[in-house]
Amino acid sequence: MPFPFTRALMRLLFTALALSAALTARAQALEPLPDDWDFTLPSLDGGRFITASQEPGPLLINFWSVDCAPCLAEMPLLQQLADGSSGWRVLLVTADTPAAAARAMQRVGSTLPVARGGKGLTALMRAAGNTRGALPFTVLMTNGRPCARHAGQLDQQTLPALLAQCPHAAAPQR
């Protein structure tokens, strides 16, 4: 029977290996972010088309779905960012039908602009490096070019860290 110290050391080693595997898997889930990533999608109501690179100022693009609890949980934080004085604009891209997305937006009290991802949503996220198609998924753009992204729910700690990856954000052109 191994000594207690040896058991503790083995547990520590296995924990370190598991953590390393998890970090490697996460790193593999996000492929390199192409400099020319962009899209044009219809707004939720179909009244206009939105081209990400032509939106003024720094832009946070959040991919979400109504059946994604973490997606809905981060909505108030995204609304707060858009309503604040940081200069960041927020665009949501939904995986859902316009009616379902509109109901969810009303339920969470969000007034953020929403684009319809449609059938090409998975390919669009994959082109931004999200090879697993996991939601929520966030891409930041400054000066019409992607500068950072995040797979998973944003919170009070991860959002500021993500925004800090784009320090040369242009001031919004309103």
Image: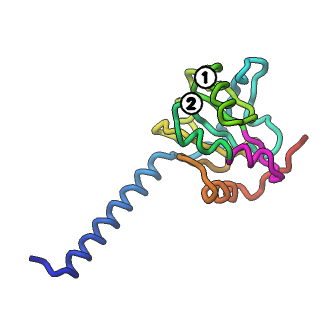
The answer to whether 93 appears left or right of 111 in the picture is left
Sooner in the amino-acid sequence: mark 1 or mark 2: 2
Q: Disc 1 to disc 2, how far (Cα)?
A: 7 Å
The answer to whether 83 appears left or right of 7 in the picture is right
Residue assigned mark 2: 66
Q: Do the residues labelled 1 and 2 touch (CB within 8 Å)?
A: yes
Give the percent coordinates (x, y) of residue 99: 64, 19
**Label 1 sits on what residue type?**
Ala
Residue assigned mark 1: 100
Closer-to-camera residue (174/101): 101
Q: Is residue 9 above or below residue 84?
A: below
Residue drawn at x 70%, y 30% is: 114
Give the percent coordinates (x, y) of residue 107: 65, 32
Q: Over which residues does the magenta segment extend?
A: 77-90
Q: Is residue 16 above or below residue 148?
A: below
Residue drawn at x 24%, y 72% is: 10
Q: In what element is the residue under mark 2?
A: loop
- Name the quarter where the C terminus is drawn: top right
Give the percent coordinates (x, y) of residue 124: 58, 31
In magenta stretch: residue 39? no
Closer-to-camera residue (122/90): 90
**Label 2 sits on what residue type?**
Val
Q: Residue furthest right?
A: 174
